[in-house]
Image: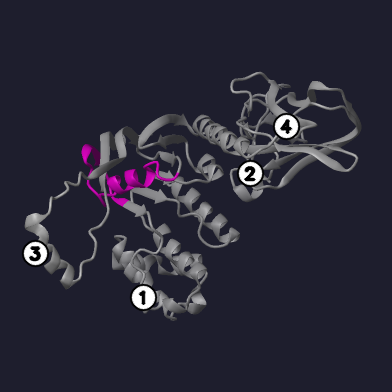
């Protein structure tokens, strides 16, 4: 890392909140003029809201920093202050270097102009010179996949085609500092992967990037450091794995309150809580290490359950089924019971997961519960750096190259050891 190219000190932005003045017709203006001497004026006190306050931050040259937080937390406001789109109410920010911003995909596009003309128009608005656009024009068109329609008016493009072309222009900016605000969700799934690959390429070119996204897997992939903004202030900052895990844990805790309010307890039996008992940790729903895992799910039984059917399944954040199992002839006496599971290992890629447990008797469902909070996997990463090759599992492994002639054995990434796992990129 080099010197700090972005320095933010106690920066804040305050906005005035209030109703717009009502539209008045001519008769309303005349009526108000005649009645004004006799009317008592009500003083209106304007309301102000701090979108951002007291934020201090340093970003080093070549660093990729993620900004996460709820909608309205102040992430976009911070990027607009850094991009000089708006002025701070208090504090200051020093930015050293040419800044490019991908804050709104499609900035400067005109529906009556062709795709070709819009590439030049949007590129100019984003700060690219004509010679620079000429040099990158073929790359932009190839990336957007709209070459066939390049001389067609933009108004005849589908919304997906417009977004692809807009991102292609913005992604080929060549600044020293890049500000990116939730622009990797454009187009279909294949194009989103292409966008993410482009951002990875940019991040490896020693450019400084501040990246805003609600997709935590994207944050984990692209960012070395993450800043969590909550209510206009920095709540936590640090390594991507630690801060993202804390954020996901907090979001899950918030989901508990809303979900439990609408959940009614079954009169015969209902699930109460769950936790990871091994490895021990605090909080008990975060898995931080690979190895044996023990789960405990607590159920309260108010009436005897005979020959019941118990099911359990595990889903990832995209609601894909990862694992499922069921047991028949489950007998439960009145009281509180612990349903315990032991796994030799849960080698799952980092991220949030949901356990779904259920209990049936004589074909009738007694209870089904999506265990809250979600299970957050925050283990060491053993996957391919490219998302399309990383899959669902996160398997530790050993990789060696053995030279047959002469039987000389070498180990890549470290010394050979029975206990040293070498995670290498390669398919």
Instruction: From the image, tell me which residue sits under label 1.
Output: 117
Marks 2 and 3, how far apart in space?
A: 64 Å
Q: CA distance from mark 2 to mark 4?
A: 16 Å
The extreme top residue here reads 280
Disc 3 designates what residue? 34
Residue at horizontal 44 percent and vertical 45 percent from the top: 71
Q: Position of residue 124 (x, y in %)?
A: 30, 65
Pointer 4: what residue? 346
Cα gap from disc 3 to disc 4, whole angstroms: 78 Å
According to the picture, the residue beneath numbered tag 2 turns out to be 317
- Badge 2 element: loop
| Disc 1 element | helix
Mark 4 neighbour class, 10 Å CA radius: few under 14, some 14 to 19, many 20 or more: some
Q: Earlier in the sequence, mark 2 or mark 3?
A: 3
Can you tell which quarter of the image residue 67 is in? top left
Q: Earlier in the sequence, mark 3 or mark 1?
A: 3
Quadrant containing the N terminus in the rendered view: top left
Report the mark closest to the observer, 2 or 4: 2
**As displayed, is residue 153 above or below residue 33?**
below
Within 10 Å of disc 1 (Cα), the crowding (few <14, some 14-19, many 20+) is some
Give, as a single range, the part of the protein colored magenta. 71-99
Q: Which numbered disc, 2 or 4, marks the residue that appears first in the sequence? A: 2
């Amino acid at each position: 890392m080099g010197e700090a190219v972005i320095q933010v000190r106690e920066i804040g932005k305050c906005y005035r909140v209030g109703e717009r003045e009502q539209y008045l017709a001519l008769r309303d203006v005349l009526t108000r003029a005649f009645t004004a001497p006799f009317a008592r004026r009500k003083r209106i006190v304007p309301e102000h809201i701090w979108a951002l306050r007291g934020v201090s931050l340093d970003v080093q040259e070549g660093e990729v920093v993620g900004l996460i937080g709820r909608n309205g937390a102040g992430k976009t406001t911070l990027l607009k202050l850094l991009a000089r789109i708006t002025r701070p109410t208090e504090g200051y920010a020093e930015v050293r270097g040419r800044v490019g911003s991908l804050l709104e995909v499609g900035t400067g596009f005109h529906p009556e102009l062709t795709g070709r003309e819009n590439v030049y128009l949007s590129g100019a608005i984003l700060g690219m010179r004509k010679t620079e656009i000429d040099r990158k024009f073929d790359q932009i068109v190839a990336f957007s996949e709209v070459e066939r329609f390049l001389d067609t008016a933009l108004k005849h493009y589908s919304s997906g085609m417009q977004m692809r072309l807009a991102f292609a222009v913005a992604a080929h900016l060549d600044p020293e500092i890049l500000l990116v605000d939730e622009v990797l969700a454009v187009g279909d799934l294949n194009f989103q992967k292409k966008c993410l690959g482009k951002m990875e390429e940019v991040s490896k070119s020693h450019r400084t990037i501040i990246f805003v996204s609600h997709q935590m897997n994207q944050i984990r992939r692209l960012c070395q450091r993450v800043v969590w903004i909550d209510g206009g202030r920095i709540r936590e900052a640090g390594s991507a794995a630690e801060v993202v895990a804390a954020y996901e844990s907090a979001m899950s805790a918030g989901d508990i309150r809303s979900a439990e309010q609408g959940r009614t307890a079954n009169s015969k039996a209902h699930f109460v809580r769950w936790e990871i008992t091994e490895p021990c940790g605090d909080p008990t729903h975060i898995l931080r290490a690979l190895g044996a895992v023990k789960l405990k799910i607590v159920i309260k039984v108010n009436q005897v359950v005979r020959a019941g059917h118990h099911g359990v399944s595990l889903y990832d954040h995209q609601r894909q089924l990862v694992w499922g199992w069921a047991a028949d002839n489950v007998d439960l006496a009145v009281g509180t019971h612990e349903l315990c599971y032991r796994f030799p290992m849960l080698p799952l890629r980092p991220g949030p997961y949901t356990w779904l447990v259920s209990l049936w008797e004589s074909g009738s469902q007694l209870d089904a519960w999506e265990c809250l909070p979600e299970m957050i996997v925050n283990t060491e990463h053993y996957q391919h750096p490219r998302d399309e090759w990383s899959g669902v599992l996160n398997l530790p492994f050993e990789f060696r190259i053995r030279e047959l002639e002469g039987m000389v054995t070498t180990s890549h990434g470290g010394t050979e050891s029975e206990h040293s796992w070498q995670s290498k990129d390669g398919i």
